[in-house]
């Protein structure tokens, strides 16, 4: 397992190398104001590699946008190389813009917890490091309440043999990932080891788990 994790991590890092571009920060206050004007809402999650988390949320009915990026850190202008080193406080994240009249935050939480293992600290198979930790970045008290209650119910259900370690933390900033990461799975659906053996199976698992949510 340890050898495979290192191998997959090497493939992932090597496959993503490209020229770096300036990243864009979306402050929490500004994002909320823009969303209120459009009657849309935001949800931000970290559940491992953002290649498959972006695609999973993009496929959900009612989701208008899902972007890969970096959240939960304090360093200025994070890059993929910086975050991927594991030496920053950021996590690879996905920022989801959705219509609450079509898809609820509760349903997004169901997808979040179903599509990764929330009991493994700093690990989302096969990737290891704090940048792959499990996090819910809540934007308001209602999102925090729903997240906390969801975790309580999951714990009571004994679905997992180990404790849930997902962090529930306030959203501050989201830095959009470099352009070459955006729609990475759709632009590279096959031909790379990480895509073929990790991302594609994760996306297919979501489609099987939630067929009623998948946009046609």
Image (cartoon, rainbow, N blue to C red):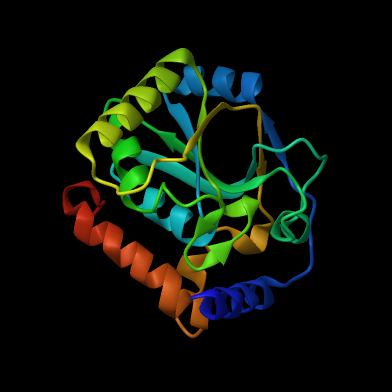
92 with respect to 187 (left or right): right
190 with respect to 24 (left or right): left
How many marks are shown on the rendered structure?
A: 0
Q: Residue at x 81, y 40 (%)?
A: 75
Q: Residue at x 54, y 74 (%)?
A: 2
Query: Residue pushed farthest bottom?
Result: 191
Query: Residue pushed farthest top?
Result: 141
Q: Quadrant of the C terminus?
A: bottom left
Q: Nearer the viewer, residue 31 or 88?
A: 88
**Residue 155, x across and y down, in percent:** 29, 35
Query: Residue pushed farthest left?
Result: 212
Q: Residue 152 falls in which quadrant of the image?
A: top left
Q: Nearer the viewer, residue 105 or 168?
A: 168
Q: Residue 148 falls in which quadrant of the image?
A: top left
Q: Nearer the viewer, residue 113 or 96?
A: 113
**Residue 82, x across and y down, in percent:** 78, 56
68 with respect to 216 (left or right): right
**Residue 85, x across and y down, in percent:** 74, 60
Q: Nearer the viewer, residue 188 or 79?
A: 79
179 with respect to 182 (left or right): right
**Residue 158, x across and y down, in percent:** 23, 41
Quick check: can you spot residue 189? no
Instruction: Answer above or below: position of 211 versus 144.
Output: below
Q: Residue at x 66, y 72 (%)?
A: 13
Instruction: Answer above or below: position of 86 versus 108.
Output: below
Instruction: Answer above or below: position of 166 versus 51.
Output: above
Quick check: can you spot residue 188? yes
């Amino acid at each position: 397992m340890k050898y495979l994790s290192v191998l997959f991590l090497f493939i992932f890092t090597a496959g993503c190398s490209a020229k770096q571009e300036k990243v864009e920060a979306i402050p929490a206050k500004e994002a909320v104001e823009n969303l209120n004007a459009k009657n849309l809402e935001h949800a931000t999650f970290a559940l491992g590699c953002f290649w498959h988390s972006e695609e999973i949320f993009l496929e959900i009915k009612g989701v208008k946008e899902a972007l890969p990026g970096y959240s939960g850190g304090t360093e200025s202008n994070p890059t993929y190389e910086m975050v991927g080193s594991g030496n920053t406080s950021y996590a690879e994240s996905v920022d989801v813009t959705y219509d609450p009249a079509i898809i609820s935050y509760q349903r997004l939480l169901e997808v979040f917890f179903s599509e990764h293992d929330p009991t493994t600290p700093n690990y989302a198979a096969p990737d290891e490091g704090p940048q792959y930790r499990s996090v819910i970045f809540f934007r308001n008290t209602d999102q925090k309440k729903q997240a906390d209650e969801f975790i309580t119910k999951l714990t009571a259900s004994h679905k997992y043999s180990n404790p849930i370690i997902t962090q529930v933390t306030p959203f501050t900033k989201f830095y959009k990932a470099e352009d070459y990461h955006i729609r990475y799975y759709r632009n590279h659906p096959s031909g790379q080891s990480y895509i073929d053996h990790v991302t594609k199976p994760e996306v297919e698992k979501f489609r099987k788990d939630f067929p009623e949510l998948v946009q046609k």
